[in-house]
Image (spheres, rainbow, N blue to C red):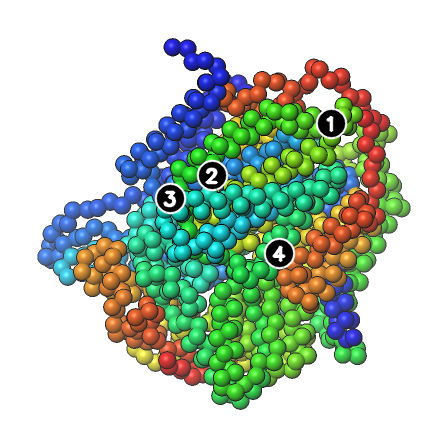
Amino acid sequence: MTTFFQLLIYGLQLGSVYALLALGYTMVYGIVGMINFAHGDFLMIGALSTVFLAMAFMSTSGTLSALQVIAIILIAMIGTGLVGVIVEAVAYKPLRDRPRMTALITAVGVSMFLQNFPRALPFIGPNPRPFPRLFPLIQYNIGGVTITSTQLIMLFLSLLLMFILYYVVNKTPLGAQMRAVSMDKDAALLMGININVIISMTFFIGAALASSSGIFYASIYPQVDVYMGGWLGTKSFIAAVLGGIGDIRGAMLGGFILGISEIFATSINSNFGYMIGFIVLILILLFKPAGLLGKFSIEKV
Amino acid sequence: MKIPKHLSKSVLPIIGFAAIYGLIMLLKSFGIANNYHIQILMFAGVNIMMTLSLNVVNGFTGQFSIGHAGFMSLGAYGSAIITTLLLKPSVIPSSMQIPVFLLSLFIGGLVAALVGFLIGLPTLKLKGDYLAIVTLAFGEIVRAGLRLIEPIGAARGMIGVPTYANLAWIFTFVALTLFVVRNVIYSRYGRAWIAIRDNEIAAEAMGIDTTRYKIISFTFSAFIAGVAGGLYAHVVSFIQPDTFSFVKSSDLLVFLYAGGSGSLTGSIVGALLLTALPEALRFLASWRLVIYALVLIIVMLYRPKGLTGGYELPFLRIHRKELYEGAADPTVPEAEEGE
Amino acid sequence: MKKTSRVLLTILTIAVFISACSTGSPAAPAEPEPQANGEKTGETLKIGVVSPMSGPGATAGKYITNGVKLIEEKLKAEGGLLVGDTRYPIEFVYEDNEAKEETTTNVYQKLINQDNVIGIVGPDMSKAILAAGPIAQSAGVVAVGTFTTNEAVTQVGDYIFRACFIDPFQGRAAATYAWDTGYKTAAVIYNNADAYSKGLYENFELAFTELGGEVVEVQAYSGSDIKDYNVQLTKIKAANPEVVFIPNMFTEIPLQVRQARELGITAPFIGGDSMDAPEVAQLAGFENIAGTAYVSAFSPDNPDPVAQEFVKAFNDAYGMNPNSNAVLAYEATMMILESIKNAATIDRKGVRDAMASLKDLHLPSGTITVGPDRNPIKGAAILMYNAEGVPEFVVNVNP
């Protein structure tokens, strides 16, 4: 029984990482109708910039205070958000009226660029680097199950971010505008909404969330390198579709489902863990073709 | 002497292919070209076949398959099992090597086609992005599944696949594929596919059984991909499941769309150029892939229809202007925009 | 598409192909000229060096290239390799195999056909040389794996050699050390997607059970990109072993060690030769890795004069101690150079035959003789990480 709860904890930990990443995917898809294959690399940018920020902060003291940690996280998130905005403006905006596959291939190119450009820079390089300890590590043992303070803090922060996002999208004017654009771009334009600003904001938020996901992921597995985002991005895309792409709650749900099932499947057979995400996805799509919380839009002729 | 038109479509291209092959062999004997170049050409050839296969589904039928590497791997493993595990070079007489090789390719294609058919049945009812996800999932499930099977080497891969494939075989198969694909596109199957691509609802309303044709397209494409995978295995002599991951699938997508989907010439150009480019850029060391990525982004920004923009070489051309993506079809009335 | 665009596109395609063709350097045979000191200058000989200069194994690549560069600089200063009365300039061609099997096959093709090398040093990973070895074998070019310890490597063909010991020996060394230290139960976590990891684990298990020990739990994971070992480690923890054997790559070990300690596993670890990289201690955390022993091809504390000379030269040139990667790359290169010296004719076959009969070559990790199966007969050392993350010499193990 203790194993079950131990695995559940790992599942929630992994799930929160997937959920945060899936949120960015789903938001971009919902608003621009585009699958941004480069999204996973925003995760990597967040993690990598945190490494350098921590080095800069630590050069004076040697350890990090709580205030410094919060500052680092915020700077990393905002910085990555800006990268997201720039990427959108340069590579995706010109293709907004083109067939979707064009933007997709461009996204592949952007992903390749985001991975290899830092790698080519001499001070970054391809080697994995240790991730600094941002959160204090205290182990709690409850009935044979080990929980660490890192896990608790991370879980709390992820849920906080998700809650903030949900609030912004559903209860603020900005969120209302975002929802309007995702429902009908042309109508929103007619209503006086500045589409470009909204789209940029969406990319900013999505990239910032991905960056936080990267920081949390790197806190669990403290080894970062320029390629860490690719595969995670694909998995969180699966999570987003699983939950219903375009739906924020769906992304969160999908992320946790994916994380938990992956951990449990790995405990049966490590290869199985590899496959489980896709199997769960297909099973769900068979019964709910639009994902768990998704809705099909009626195709009019 | 004026060459009759129907001959110019088939005989000339064949002579052209043979001539190019002859030229390459000549260069090799002079030492200007060597095995390294030949290998690049062989990879390019396999990629051309794979891109053509993807073109059938994505370019001409307008579907959204992004897991095509899965079919390639089924073909690769299917044919490798025949030539490496079952009918090994050590147990068959050397005169039988070529027939065994061809048989293995056929079986590889068949395995891929069968799986394509089985996958296609339930999933081709899905539309757009959902179909994409399922094809992606399929590709990865095949990969994860292959990693579990010990007799074929599991995740460590299979070594020692006999290198039966040489440039002549690759040339032959590429030519054959072009010939077959072009003629199928010209047939009623191709016309149905293009109708589905341009407006699926209208096609359905006109009485075309869209699901049936979509499945045929998928299966046909999978067969080609399987044969290409088999050829690949016999070029590279070592295959492992991770070669055929989503990265490979996205490489194929790049070849297709950067070259120009819906155009057979586009598939040739895209696959050729983008296979050779990373090799040509080797002198850039760690900046190699950065430049490659930039080239890709620039191509998509400035030539969104792909490098060829829908152009077809004369012998590949099908004389219907409306068959090319993006061009207006004068015979079908403009669809109303829904609000 | 307009006619001009068509023409431009065709020209572009051809141009790309041509430039793909010209990435190699053509071999330039030179006429031997008599020098002032009576030496003749022979043709430039090329040796390929394949290592992971990018990707997850890139640290190993750095050590490997540094090890070879020591020789390169020395040869440049001397003007080349002296064979009899002729000096042959040696050119080293460094290629990156990205720690991938496919890229290794590509790179081998290029070195063999484009650069016309007379021999190849590397790669360092068993799975990479297993995949690319057949190419060298059928082309008749000597390939010397530096750190390729899996048994099957030299079985690929008679042109494939290695500079390191083999896994049966290594597994036995690890098992003997564990048993002699008093551990009776062991657990293993290994990568079943890597021939090296699997082979080493199997050899360890064989030897350990022969000695009387018991392997109480075996857990596997599939792939070097996996970061989460918690599930496997939880099961290992439940089995309560006295020692945990981790025959994995140095990119995977740090997280395994960390997660194991965070889970509450206090048993010490034993690793294989791939643990000999400074990043391991850094990434794993000094307090986590302290007390971890591993089998190594080389110990910088070895008092042998040849070893000490090598350590000093490496330190002077690069400001750090060499590790097994550097040593083995150095030794593999020396093996090829020595074979060129002893060769009946200076060509690919001559080098191969000379290498197969290499005897008593005094190298930093010991005196080696190439055995009939093309495996060098050499010993190993057991090193252990101390509390500062520095490996210290424990004991020598002889074949």
Element under label 2? helix
Q: Earlier in the sequence, mark 3 or mark 2?
A: 3
For label 1, the residue is B208
Residue type indicated by callout 4: Gly
Measure the alpha-carbon separation of dots 1 and 2: 36 Å
Q: Earlier in the sequence, mark 3 or mark 4?
A: 3
Quarter of the rendering occupied by the N terminus of chain B: top left
Q: Position of residue C51 (x, y in %)?
A: 42, 58
| Discs 3 and 4 carry the same chain letter | yes
Q: Earlier in the sequence, mark 4 or mark 1?
A: 4
| Discs 1 and 2 carry the same chain letter | yes
Residue A48 seen by the camera:
no
Measure the alpha-carbon separation of dots 1 and 3: 48 Å
Instruction: Name the mark nearer the viewer: 3 or 4.
Output: 4
Which chain hosts label 1?
B
Which chain hosts label 2?
B
Q: Any mark on residue B36, and which?
A: 3
For label 4, the residue is B145
Q: Earlier in the sequence, mark 1 or mark 2?
A: 2
Residue type indicated by callout 2: Ala
Residue type indicated by callout 1: Ile
* Label 3 crowd (10 A; few <14 / some 14-19 / many >=20): many
